[in-house]
Amino acid sequence: MRLTAPNPTEMPTMQDDFELHLETLAIRAGQERSQFGEHAEALYLTSSFVADNAAQAAARFTGVEPGYIYSRFTNPTVTQFQERLAALEGAEAAVATASGMSAILALCMGHLKAGDHILASAGMFGATIQLFNNWLGKFGVSASYVDATNPAAWAAAVKPETRLFYLETPSNPLTEVADIAAIAAVAHAHQALMVVDNCFCSPALQQPLKHGADLVIHSATKYIDGQGRVLGGAVVGSKALIEPVYQFLRTAGPTLSAFNAWVLTKGLETLGIRMKAHCENALALAQWLEAQPAVEKVYYPGLPSHPQHELAKRQQSGGGGVVSFELKGGKDAAWKLIDAVQLLSRTANLGDVKTTITHPYTTTHGRISPEAKAAAGIREGLVRISVGLEHIEDIQRDLARGL
């Protein structure tokens, strides 16, 4: 296995001579040791890098010679994170960004132009819908939304100008599971790119490229960090498809800092074991919630009652760490529950070892229209929990205060 970085003026890639397991790649992939031979990954806190002479500087700027230039677009610590994440997704390359939303923006700026159309799943993170409608729309990129779980709906909604299919699976917050392979086949039949937001699963539970996706989006802020410490994002895919995203980042600069990249790299080392524990706790909580009289409906792919349970078992290696549920009594009941907890954190972030609780209607999806909320199935009684790694009985007892 190669442990050194590629030409940093190009996109970093992972090239193995033999296949390693995900747990090993999460700890070893992409490491480049300095002349000091450090065991843990080094942190390069520098804005720029020095060339030996003018000719070398010119060669590095043009990409003729490998070498680091400026940390807006080349940094050894960021390269290590990119290589490691690409290896976990089974991809050729990755480009890291300052946040998950900047990763989506960089993807769109790299691959879309005025007049293009995005076809997206209706049940998505509210900020993604805002980005597509309010910001890309200002520059002539249109978007429309369909039922993520119905491949026929995607086929029916394609336009001649559709260039990109964008899908969250599982979706935020209802954990809808979409058939990646079936929707990718529709996208490719119409010469469109298929993009999957893999935030809820992470590569530890799902690898969309293996099911036909062209590109994968990550908010590394979530499970990849896993402890609520730093922001980060990434776009993962083939070298050819990552290159225009990288060129946008090089020019515009929504860059992942070296420090954040170092934290996220260390987060990847425990990703596999953390995700197993998140899944175990989430399934136990979902089963417990189904038995509570105050709960009207529970949304969790690991439950047999979930409408895409069988698909989730084929496509994912676990149900994930997010459980959503609707309470009888609407918003009043939801807010009463959220206000009653003493252990859980009232925050819209997810993917943390600490369990978090939020009211999607007024937080994560608060800025989208009531019509868009209704189309996405976001009702006022809905509560979303990102199940952490506390003891499950303590989580249940805390929720029981408000139930």
Image (cartoon, helix red, strand yellow):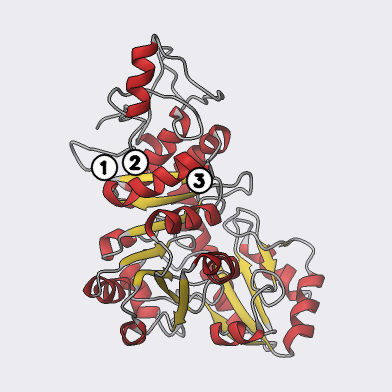
The answer to whether the residues at label 1 and label 2 have Cβ atoms under 8 Å apart is: yes
Write the residue at 33% across / 28% down: 62
In the rendered image, the quadrant that contains the N terminus is top left
How crowded pointer 1 is (Cα within 10 Å; few <14, some 14-19, many 20+) is rated as: some
State the separation of the CA atoms marked 3 and 1.
Answer: 26 Å
Front-lying residue, 214 or 270:
214
| Mark linked to residue 20 | 1
The spot of residue 122 in percent (x, y) is 49, 79
Which image quadrant for residue 359?
A: bottom right
Q: CA distance from mark 1 to mark 2?
A: 6 Å
Q: Residues within 10 Å of mark 3 (few under 14, many from 20)?
A: many
Query: Mark 3 is on which residue type?
Result: Thr
The image shows residue 71, relative to residue 21, as above or below, that is above
Using the image as rendered, state which of residue 309 and residue 107 is in the foreground: 107
Q: Residue furthest left?
A: 17
Secondary structure state at the residue bearing disc 2: helix
* 278 with respect to 338 (left or right): left
Residue with the mark numbered 3: 97
- The residue labelled by disc 2 is 25
**Is 98 situated left or right of 355 in this image?**
left
> Can you say whether 265 is above or below 55 in the image?
below
Residue at point 42% right, 79% down? 148
Res. 88 in view: no
- Rate crowding at label 2 as few (under 14), some (14 to 19) or many (20 or more) other CA atoms within 10 Å: many
Does label 1 or label 2 sit earlier along the sequence? 1
Figure check: 261 above or below 224: above
SS under mark 3: strand
Lower sequence index among marks 3 and 2: 2
